[in-house]
Image (cartoon, rainbow, N blue to C red):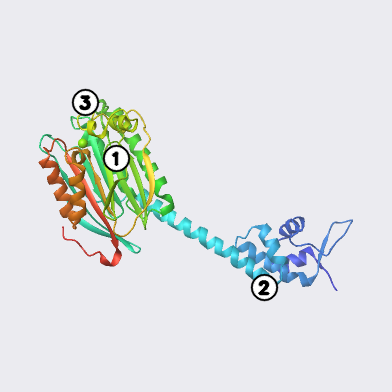
């Protein structure tokens, strides 16, 4: 057997002499002989095939430890190791592709207008039919509520602070959320919502710094963000989200109010809430001064589910039983939303009223709903 010098072996295998030295040290590709005096390395020509395999696996990006295992294994076992490695690369790439697509959409910012329209969206086997309605009510000069309904995002914000401050705050927070109305990977729903809400909080603080007249403004926020059958919910303040499932209605948000805390602590009864003097005192909201934590939940959407997002102008003015009846009996989301506004007006309409009704339906059922 005629041995090859490391220079000859490097040329024949396409590996550099530096790489050969490293692979020797890592026990990845050992020379058959090393001259004790000169430390020259000698290789068997039969090692060329293993050397070329190492070079190929390096080009694939395989880690050295995995290459050592694969290049020393019999071909069938090496093939199995390579298959497993590549499956893992594909899975990681797919997750990164989704995240990149979301970030590109998020950073380039996609907006669309709010309106009292019904629309559809399709996502895998589920689709959402939704409608949004907002009304100034009977006793206010301005509508400080803001809402957004897009392909994947539904949001209601109830501004406070008066002198246009409330209107500014609710609109700013809705604007901060709009870029999320893109393909957010299911695993990123809560991160994305959390990030957007923190961003919104900073925006409010900056606006108040630029214009001190806005320093008293704030807003509630209740929003749902969809990804396939996964649903992210972010909530702060006293707007609410309800779920109608299998004919039963559930309030899936917890009011951040003084009366809710007193109720939770058993200090007042449910009947006393409506007449409590501090009924409107909100303990947590997005404000210009303090960064309160919002509640975050991850939920599973099911066909047949109906969601209601509303400002307190609805749930304060209309009783729970009437709201529930409308949600259970009025099939069309747009009609249901209009009916809910009517309930609040009948209840005196003391505040701005905003509601979004969204139905989860199998994708093939969803047909365009006229505006
Ligand atoms: Mg309100």
Give the camera-side residue of 35 and 63.
63
Tag 3 residue: 277
For the residue carrying disc 2, how many other residues have a C-alpha within 10 Å: few (<14), some (14-19), or many (20+)? few
Q: Residue at x 33, y 58 (%)?
A: 302
Q: CA distance from mark 2 to mark 1?
A: 58 Å
Helix, strand, or loop for circle 2? Answer: helix
Whichever of labels 1 and 3 marks the residue nearer the N terminus, that label is: 1
- Say if mark 2 contacts mark 1, CB within 8 Å: no
State the count of labels.
3
On residue 172, the disc is none
Tag 2 residue: 76
Location of the C terminus (image quadrant): bottom left
Name the front one of labels 1 and 3.
3
Give the camera-side residue of 259 and 146.
259
Q: Position of residue 166 (x, y in %)?
A: 22, 33
Whichever of labels 2 and 1 marks the residue nearer the N terminus, that label is: 2
């Amino acid at each position: 057997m005629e041995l090859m010098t490391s220079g000859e072996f490097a040329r024949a295998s396409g590996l550099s002499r530096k790489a050969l030295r490293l692979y020797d040290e890592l026990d990845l590709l050992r020379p058959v002989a090393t001259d004790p005096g000169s430390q020259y390395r000698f290789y068997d020509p039969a090692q060329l095939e293993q050397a070329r395999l190492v070079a190929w696996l390096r080009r694939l990006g395989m880690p050295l430890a995995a290459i050592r295992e694969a290049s020393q294994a019999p071909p069938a076992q090496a093939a199995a190791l390579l298959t497993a490695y590549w499956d893992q690369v594909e899975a990681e790439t797919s997750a990164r592709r989704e995240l990149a697509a979301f970030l590109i959409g998020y950073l380039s910012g996609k907006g669309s207008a709010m309106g009292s329209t019904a629309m559809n969206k399709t996502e895998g086997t589920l689709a959402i039919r939704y409608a949004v309605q907002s009304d100034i009510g009977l006793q206010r000069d301005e509508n400080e509520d803001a809402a957004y309904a897009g392909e994947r995002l539904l949001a209601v914000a109830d501004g406070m602070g008066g002198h246009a401050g409330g209107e500014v705050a609710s609109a700013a927070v809705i604007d901060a959320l709009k870029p999320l109305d893109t393909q957010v990977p299911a695993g990123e729903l809560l991160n994305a919502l959390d990030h957007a809400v923190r961003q919104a909080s900073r925006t409010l603080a900056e606006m108040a710094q630029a214009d001190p007249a806005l320093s008293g403004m704030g807003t509630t926020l209740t929003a749902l963000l969809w990804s396939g059958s996964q649903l992210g919910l972010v909530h702060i303040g006293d707007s609410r989200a309800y779920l109608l499932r299998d004919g039963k209605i559930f309030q899936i948000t917890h009011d951040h109010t003084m009366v809710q805390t007193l109720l939770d602590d058993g200090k007042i009864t449910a009947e006393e809430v409506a007449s409590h003097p501090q009924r409107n005192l909100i303990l947590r909201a997005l404000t210009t001064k303090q960064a309160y934590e919002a509640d975050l939940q991850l939920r599973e959407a099911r066909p047949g589910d109906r969601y209601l997002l509303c400002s307190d102008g609805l749930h304060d003015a209309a009783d729970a039983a009437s709201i529930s009846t409308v949600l259970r009996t009025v099939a069309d989301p747009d009609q249901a939303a209009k009916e809910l506004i009517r309930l609040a007006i009948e209840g005196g309409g003391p505040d701005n009223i905003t509601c979004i009704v969204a139905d989860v339906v199998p994708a093939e059922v969803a047909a365009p709903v006229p505006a």
